[in-house]
């Protein structure tokens, strides 16, 4: 295993041809029994395992991943981090994550490349202005950073934006503490830290069934054999419904394909993240110079990771209207992911009808930003056997009781 990272060690390894780094996390065999098994080796699952090991009084912990670590939605997103949501429940959840992002590289001793370059939501008409100002004032009243920018201030922040095109810019809401991070580094950093604390990480291990006795989960069936478990956490995003059915219950989720693309790399031209709910598109620039472009989900319900051409045409046409200077740039690559979406566009964090089986899902297109906060809250909830305060409003019972956290309708935020 690789040891502590530092500037001195980097200099030392550069002199010896970088031959002494070693493996970043261990490769374990599936044990016979664990106190907690986390199913899903993406960012949220690995974060949960890390906080279980580092902050909770838990014994043996395992992470089971059917493919490779971080190969699902963690590797298939646009890396945006923000917490500018309308409802207090959502705001508390996501701002908890932003605060953790700010110290994550130091905590994990791994550079997750978190860059607080800010996130700007632009408004195009009077309706947009009213919704945006309402959200801005609500966020500020809750003590979270949010600023209303005039069209002139938007142009000063983003010189390449077109103020007077087909989608005129009439202002925008700016969150300075928002930004982007490196998705792969987040998964690798959590895997390295969790493995260093004794967590068994088992890749290429698919869960194929659950051992449930008298309504209580006692073990799992996997492609590598059976394993006993006192508690199980499902953190598998677009595969949540399938595993829930294996355990004997249903989740209120829809599965959609979400696509994104990056351009050829160019010199720095965009210093912040720009989002437009009106045209359902957003753009940022990566550290490598690529323009990262995303939009809404494809409409058909699907488990596919390949979307249709309609999304590409509509999204790029809108983005080009906002940024005419990119009209002739080449697309370097496109990709898609399977996202799990709830009716109220808020996540599910809570217990299931099966005792000692917990679920973390329903993040839709916004799961990456919540990674450290989600793992932290979910770990403490599993350890206690009850959902902690910030996670409690997001249980499945809200759909039965009508206590929705409807961010999609309230904020007009592209999830």
Image (tube, helix red, strand yellow):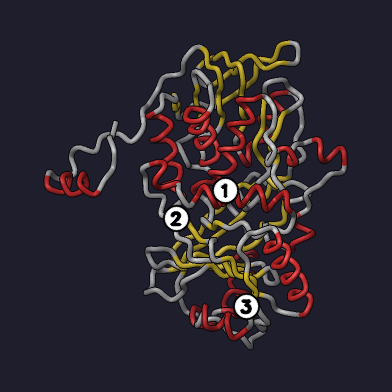
Tag on residue 42? none
Q: Is residue 402 left or right of residue 272?
A: right
For the C terminus, the image quarter is: bottom right
Label 2: state its secondary structure: loop
In the image shown, does 4 or 324 lie closer to the viewer? Answer: 4
The answer to whether 335 appears left or right of 245 in the picture is left
Question: Is 176 on the left-hand or right-hand side of 401?
Answer: left
- Farthest residue toward the right? 401
Q: How far apart are marks 3 and 2 (CA)?
A: 24 Å
Cα–Cα gap, marks 1 and 3: 25 Å
The correct choice, above or below, for 46 with respect to 198 in the image is: below
Q: Quadrant of residue 317?
A: bottom right
| Residue in the foreground of this view, choosing between 33 and 314 | 33
Lower position in the chain sequence, tag 2 or tag 1: 1
Q: How crowded is mark 1: few (under 14 residues within 10 Å), some or many (20 or more)?
A: many
Q: In this view, does 239 lie above or below 313?
A: above
Q: Where is residue 395 in the image (x, y as percent from the top left)?
A: 75, 37
Residue 288: in sight, yes or no? yes
Q: In the current view of this chain or complex, which residue is farthest to the left?
A: 15
How far across and how far down the image is residue 268, in percent? 39, 73
Q: What SS does tag 3 mark?
A: strand
Question: Callout 1: helix, strand or loop?
Answer: helix
- Find residue 149 and name its label: 3
Q: Quadrant of residue 84?
A: bottom right
Q: Name the residue under label 1.
A: 97
Instruction: Using the image, determine if residue 150 lies above or below residue 280.
Output: below
Tell me which residue sits at (39%, 63%) in the image. 287
Q: Position of residue 37 (x, y in %)?
A: 55, 23
Q: Nearer the viewer, mark 3 or mark 2?
A: 3
Relative to 118, residue 1 above or below = above
> In x, y percent, where is residue 291?
47, 68
Where does label 2 land, which residue?
114
């Amino acid at each position: 295993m690789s040891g502590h990272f530092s500037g001195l060690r980097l200099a030392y390894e550069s002199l010896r041809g970088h031959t002494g780094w070693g493996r970043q996390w261990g490769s374990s065999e599936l044990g016979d029994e664990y106190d907690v098994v986390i199913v899903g080796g993406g960012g949220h699952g690995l974060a949960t395992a890390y906080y279980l090991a580092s902050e909770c009084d838990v014994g043996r912990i395992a992470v089971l991943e059917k493919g490779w670590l971080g190969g699902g939605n963690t590797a298939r997103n646009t890396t945006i981090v923000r917490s500018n949501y309308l409802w207090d429940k959502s705001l508390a959840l996501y701002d908890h994550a932003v605060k953790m992002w700010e110290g994550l590289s130091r905590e994990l001793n791994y550079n997750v490349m978190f860059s607080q370059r800010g996130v700007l939501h632009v408004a195009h008409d009077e309706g947009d202005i009213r919704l945006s100002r309402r959200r801005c004032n609500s966020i500020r009243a809750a003590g979270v950073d949010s600023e209303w920018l005039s069209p002139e201030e938007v142009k000063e922040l983003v010189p390449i934006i077109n103020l007077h095109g087909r989608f005129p810019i009439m202002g925008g809401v700016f969150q300075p503490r928002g930004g982007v991070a490196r998705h792969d580094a987040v998964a690798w950093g959590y895997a390295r830290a969790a493995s260093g604390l004794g967590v068994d990480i088992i890749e290429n291990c698919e869960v194929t069934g659950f051992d449930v006795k008298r309504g209580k989960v006692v073990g799992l069936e996997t492609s590598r054999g059976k394993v006993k478990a006192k508690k199980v956490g499902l953190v598998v995003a677009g595969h949540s419904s399938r595993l829930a059915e294996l355990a004997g219950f249903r989740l209120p989720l829809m599965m959609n394909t979400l696509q994104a693309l990056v351009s050829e790399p160019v010199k720095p031209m965009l210093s912040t993240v720009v989002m437009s709910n009106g045209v359902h598109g957003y753009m940022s620039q990566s550290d490598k110079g690529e323009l990262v472009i995303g939009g809404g989900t494809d409409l058909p319900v699907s488990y596919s990771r390949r979307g249709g051409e309609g999304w590409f045409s509509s999204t790029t046409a809108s983005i080009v209207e906002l940024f005419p200077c990119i009209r002739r740039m080449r697309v370097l690559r496109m990709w898609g992911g399977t996202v799990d979406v709830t009716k109220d566009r808020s996540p599910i964090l809570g217990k299931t009808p099966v005792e000692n089986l917990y679920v973390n899902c329903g993040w839709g297109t916004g799961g990456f930003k919540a990674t450290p906060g989600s793992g932290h809250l979910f770990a403490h909830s599993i350890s206690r056997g009850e959902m902690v305060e910030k996670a409690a409003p997001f249980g499945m019972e809200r759909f039965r009781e009508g206590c929705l956290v409807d961010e999609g309708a309230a904020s007009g935020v592209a999830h």
